[in-house]
Image (cartoon, helix red, strand yellow):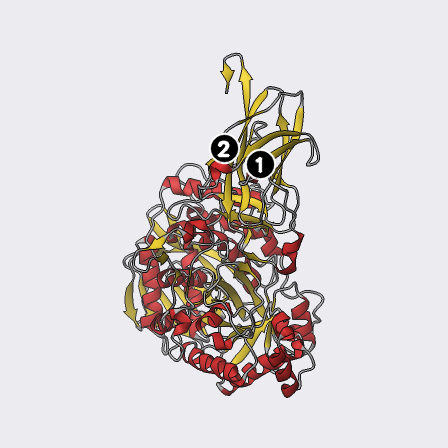
Amino acid sequence: MKQRRMTVANRTVVGVLAALVLAACGGSPGNGSPQSPSGSESPLSRTAIEGPRIIPAPRKMEAGTGAFAVGGNTRLEFGDGVDGERLGGYLTGLFQETYGIGLGTAGNVPDSNVIRFELTAGGSAGGPEGYSLASSPSRIVISAADSRGLFYGAVTLWQLLSKQQGGFVVPAVTIEDSPRFAWRGLMLDSARHYQPPEFIRKFIDVMALHKLNVLHWHLTDDQAWRLEIKKYPRLTEVGAWRVPAGPAAAADIDPATGKPRLYGGFYSQEDVRDLVAYARSRNISIVPEIDMPGHASAAIAAYPKLAVLDRPSPDVPADWGVYPNLFNAEEATFQFLEDVLAEVVTLFPGEYIHVGGDEAVKDQWKASRRVQARMRELGAKDEHELQSYFIRRMETFLTSKGRRLIGWDEILEGGLAPNATVMSWRGIDGAVAAAASGHDTVLSPQPTLYFDRRPFDTPTSPGRVEISTVENVYAFDPAPAAISEEQRKHILGVQANLWTEHIRTPARVEFMAFPRAAAIAEVGWSPTKDWAGFSERLSAQLERYQVLDVRFAEAPMPRPVDPFHRTSHEMALCTDKIALMLEDDAPLAGDRAVFKVDIMNPCWMFKGADLSKATALVASVGQVPFNFQIGDAVKEIVLSKPATPAGELEVRVDDCNGERIAVLPLAPAVGNFAVTTLPAATIKPREGLHDLCLTFTRKSIDPIWTIDSIELKTTTAAGTE
């Protein structure tokens, strides 16, 4: 972690940002919510006075009297059986890197000004992750039945630390703590966009400080295969690389090959072993996902014999959405997948292996004579039963290796493998069905726990237009009433997912993950909910992100409505069929524009435009590739016939069937992959405020023309402005 000491200015900014985060999700910076601190006071500097600001909230906490001073003379002490080298190294590194505090080691001799870690005999009611922490002015004792509990006690100790006049202190407090659920996870999609190992190490570090313990690592999909498999090297030689969609990438020629530059990367087995070991040192289990039988395009590009089609595409595709490409059901394909999983289980020693199982469109299976013959051979009455056979066979193999299969809730269709665990993403229905049939389940439903949904209405972050706020996440119930008390024993826990189709960079991963990850951490750990208390503690958490150099989501400062100028974000979409915040495909380096658009109907409403003095309309437009696999829905896209080869932007008044008041030819923008400002169109002034409907004429769905901004030019006594 990068050391980043707090300045007075930083602390003030964090207080303001906490208020903005809460305001964006419906909270208010009143009683129980963070406020902008005044002077040099920061949220962390107030903790000893107002009470510890720990996230996730402990199960039980009682305040004492006084405080323990932490400094260069503070020493660590370890009881019998404690791995002091590991635990002490972690804590001293954390204190040093975040606050510049050096700690010493006392060995096993009792002393004052000591932080002691000890294992308790006979176990703990809190389980292996439970711990107790007792601090007084003279010493701190953290005890647990297991090293995992001691680790989380160390994390809590770090959160208790506050800056007071003269140094750092830990308030006197007694804590008894343990998690509500065993599975507290985040999913990171590295298939759509590759994140370097050093970022994943940082992500693991920050997860651990939230007491999250599962990193579900999405490694294969249609757009890439990221995991090195020694027996099948083409999976990464071919499958880890693609040409991004759009003319900008197509024009970026690699001089070494004379072809468009490839985008991607993969994780070597050495990378994986290092990350798995690093995660284990932070009490995090990495659960790999190897998708099957769908989301198979990258693997098929590498090894065409895996396909249902006779001549599959040799290229890894760049479209988002759901492809129809499935693995075939031949014995050679099952052998391939078992070979892959055999290497996977040697790399990932955890209990679970995720096999996907979602969004397996069965059209290719239905149309294939050979697949239909295989279904008869295997005794599958339909394609759902064939998928069930597929998953059962993988489950049998994984069981033979001492592992458990987990998959998305589609694995319920056609019959569930005996020991499979279900991850419910299509609402909670999959979890309800799994628990009712005696299967373990993890709740991970969209849209609330899908962190590709925006945390609030921000114009600069690509993703889905749909919003899931910090408060929405915090309000989620992992044990809903639809699951009976008896069946709730099958609820392993809860997980939020970072799908990265529209999250291209590591910085955006952090922006979309935090502070919502703090909310899901408390949902998974703490036995009760207290939104007001969580809101109050959030300002301290945001300051910790600053210390850790972690980017987090902060709402933009509100701006007044301008009757003469709007961006696409400030206009209403005419429809909400597939509404996205799409990043431009150019420029290749540097910042790119982000457009709000319904890809099914690129149409915007500029509401309340003041046309009384408007004499001209200026439009800035962009074009993005239509790289979306949406099945038959593509047939519903209506094209408006253009008057010129390049098409036009049409502007109508009052509604989309109203008078056409301006037409702006798109020809000047055709050759520019980034945003283009079109020549102004003259318009006639008219009294009052009016809505403007903006649409494009075009010959095909690709590219998608988009609005970046619209400006009305007005005439004054001094001329046009």
Spatial CA span between label 1 and label 2: 10 Å
Residue 304 shown left or right of residue 481 in the figure: left
Amino acid at the residue labelled 1: Leu
The 10 Å Cα crowd at callout 1, few under 14, some 14 to 19, many 20 or more, is: many
Mark 1 element type:
strand
The 10 Å Cα crowd at callout 2, few under 14, some 14 to 19, many 20 or more, is: some
Amino acid at the residue labelled 2: Leu
Q: Which of marks 1 and 2 is nearer the N terminus?
A: 1
Residue at the (56%, 64%) spot, across then down: 323
Identify the disc placed on residue 588.
none
Identify the disc placed on residue 649.
1
Mark 2 element type:
loop
> Which residue does the numbered mark 2 point to in the structure image?
678
Within the image, what quadrant is residue 356 found in? bottom right
Q: Which of 220 and 336 is in front in this view?
A: 336
Task: Please identify the quadrant where the N terminus is shown.
Answer: bottom left
Q: Which of 144 and 576 is in front in this view?
A: 576
Within the image, what quadrant is residue 229 found in? bottom left
**Measured from the top left, where is residue 407 in percent x and y?**
57, 73
Q: Which of 282 and 89 is in front in this view?
A: 282
Residue 7 shown left or right of residue 371 in the figure: left
**Measured from the top left, where is residue 651 in percent x and y?**
62, 33
Q: Tell me if residue 217 can be seen.
A: yes
Q: Which of 28 and 279 is in front in this view?
A: 279
Q: Please count the marks in the image.
A: 2
**Measured from the top left, where is residue 483 in percent x and y?**
69, 69
**Measured from the top left, where is residue 687 in percent x and y?**
67, 20
Residue at the (65%, 42%) spot, across then down: 574
Q: Check contact, mark 1 vs mark 2: CB within 8 A.
A: yes
